[in-house]
Image (cartoon, helix red, strand yellow):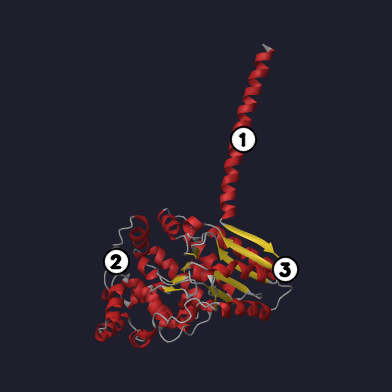
Amino acid sequence: MRQQNVWRLMSRFNSFRRTNIILQHLRMSKHTEAAEDVLLEKKGCAGVITLNRPKLLNALNLNMAQKIYSQLKKWEQDPETSLIIIKGAGGKAFCAGGDIRAISDAVKAKQKLAEIFFKEEYILNNAIASLQKPYIALIDGITMGGGVGISVHGQFRVATEKSVFSMPETAIGLFPDVGGGYFLPRLQGKLGYFLALTGFRLKGRDVYRVGIATHFVDSEKVSMLEEDLVALKSPSKENVADVLETYHTQSKIDQDKSFILEDHLDKINRCFSANTMEQIIENLQQDGSPFALEQLKVINQMSPTSLKITLRHLIKGSSQTLKDVLTEEYRMSQACMRGHDFHEGVRAVLVDKDQSPKWKPANLKEVTDEDLDNYFKSLGSNDLRF
């Protein structure tokens, strides 16, 4: 009898242990999964950030934004860390944007993810811009939306022949955020307005030519470049710039190829200098060239609301500080979450993938100035604070 009891107790203990081990594994795998979507390492004189969601093209989520921010702050104070490098894993993308499907799902489920995510993301963008140490973004691959936010505000941005830059937000009922209202209107002529409204993709050396990147390096040399940067001894910004310049000068890929928009810059400057979307469209129609008509076709597929808020935002942002721009973008992001077009854009592009969004309002003239004003209204105590 006693033996039976002992046996029963042991078997209960064993199954309890088994359950515990399984739970522990689940916890660990969950933890590992969360821990590994961004790798933070100290190598030589550098803090190295690796965005590590290659299957999702290193899309940025809340966990990643929070971890990068807190690590940046630590490295900024650490006398042993002289520079910070950020890169993407997997060879395809640096970072293809924010995890917008998860955000849309959370809004529909009445969860607060969108409130928190945009706040943390924009605070991180500002921290990168005001960082007191050299920050080098290796944008070797797809760099869109949120990926632009964690690179373009840094001091050094290295493009390669594999770089693809785009701000495609007007196609999903959003607007070029992450400081887009600050850096886009500061590109040459009206190029930033064109890129913001059409989502046009720039590739390879062209990303450098427009000033999105500060240097251009052959993709196969990027790991050597990283090794050389990491090996520097207490470098100054000038030392870092020298290393980057050496690699940049050695790169011959597409050196003699002309800028893809070279022949269209006058048209872009002329057509996109208007203060209203209606006038931009009229300018493109009047121009009538194949290039202008192609842009017209693209613009007509975009969310009318997104087009109008984007244009107003860029015009305002051209004379604002980055902090002011990000504060405004936070207001706009929350208004987009409350609206129809963002969720419809995510459905059409990422969920059903039918690429046929039904925008509301469906055309520009139905988007009133009063509608637009609502996107820029203060959120009071919920406004973004740095």
In three-dimensional space, the C-alpha distance between marks 3 and 2, rounded to whole angstroms, equals 50 Å
Q: Quadrant of residue 386?
A: bottom right
Residue at disc 2, secondary structure: loop
Q: Where is residue 238 in the image (x, y as percent from the top left)?
A: 67, 81
User: With 264 as the anchor, is 383 left or right in this view?
Assistant: right
Identify which residue, 245 or 192, lies in the foreground: 245
Q: Can residue 386 be seen in this view?
A: no
On residue 330, the disc is none
Residue at disc 3, secondary structure: loop
- Indicate the amino acid at tag 3: Asp
On residue 20, the disc is 1
Q: Which of marks 1 and 3 is nearer the N terminus?
A: 1
User: With 51 as the anchor, is 166 left or right in this view?
Assistant: left
Q: In which quarter of the image is residue 84?
A: bottom right
Q: Nearer the viewer, mark 1 or mark 2?
A: 1
- Indicate the amino acid at tag 2: Lys
Residue at disc 1, secondary structure: helix
Label 3 sits on residue: 78
Mark 1 Cα within 10 Å, few/some/many (few <14, many 20+)?
Answer: few
Mark 3 Cα within 10 Å, few/some/many (few <14, many 20+)?
Answer: few
Q: Where is residue 148 in the image (x, y as percent from the top left)?
A: 50, 71
Q: Is residue 85 visible?
A: yes
Label 2 sits on residue: 360
Which quadrant, please, contains the N terminus? top right
